[in-house]
Image (cartoon, rainbow, N blue to C red):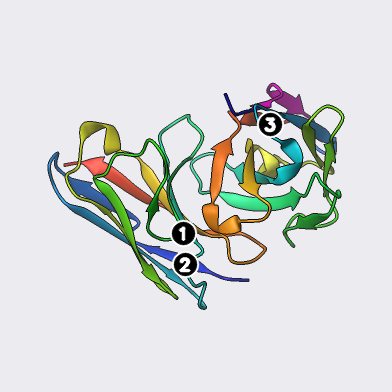
Amino acid sequence: DIQMTQSPSSLSASVGDRVTITCRASQSINNYLNWYQQKPGKAPKLLIYAASSLQGGVPSRFSGSGSGTDFTLTISSLQPEDFATYYCQQSYSTPRTFGQGTKVEIK
Amino acid sequence: EVQLVQSGAEVKKPGATVKISCKGTGYIFTNYNIHWVQQAPGKGLEWMGLVDPEDGETKYAEKFQGRVTITADTSTDTAYMELSSLRSADTAVYYCVRELTAGPVYGMDVWGQGTTVTVSS
């Protein structure tokens, strides 16, 4: 199984801050890396697919990068509605695996 | 509108079986795999398995192998997840989610609203 490791597990940031979350795969997954946002009591929402492609309707302040084993999700200017938990996930093989999540909290 | 609509909350006793449905609307059902994801209270997302509605092929996570059965009915565009021998650790929200069969690189783009399963004596 491919293990996905996110860091940090949580972070505190202020509105307007630039936020970066990293995700590492235990083996190469090419660009089969997706990012999801989840708010309390809600289903996850796809933000980024194929490592760097923005899902339709997602604000352009979200961006993704990376290939192989190392990936990054960046929020260029944190907005109040961005406080949530973020998960990376590989779709390279089954079992599909998720990172443990990064909780972005208000500073 | 593309949607996955899940059945309602369930309360089950230990040892029982639960079956959750997930109806797809607004898209060609057989073009997308349906995955099931478990989220225990306060925990992360855990993949349980998938079904390809086109041919019924399934794949399961080792953790749930032997207890989970995922099926799809193309006459009603509905997928099902059945989990047996329930224990308290199965108390969780269960999500169905679609992924383009021919293009997993596009991610899991439409999620159901989630079904809460509570296992309690």
Asked if the residues shown at circle 3 and circle 2 are in contact, with their CB atoms under 8 angstroms apart, the answer is no
The type of residue carrying mark 3 is Val
The type of residue carrying mark 2 is Asn
| Label drawn at residue B117 | 3
**Is B85 within the magenta?**
no
User: Hey, which quadrant is residue B102 in on the image?
Assistant: bottom right
Q: Main secondary structure of the magenta part?
A: strand
Out of B116 and A19, give the one closest to the viewer: A19
Query: What range is drawn magenta here?
Result: B5-12
Asked if the residues shown at circle 2 and circle 1 are in contact, with their CB atoms under 8 angstroms apart, the answer is yes
Q: Which residue is mark 1?
A: A50
The type of residue carrying mark 1 is Ala
On the rendered image, what quadrant is the N terminus of chain B found in? top right
**Is B7 within the magenta?**
yes
Left or right, A106 with reference to B37: left
Q: Which residue is mark 2?
A: A31
On the rendered image, what quadrant is the C terminus of chain B found in? top right
Q: CA distance from mark 2 to mark 1?
A: 5 Å
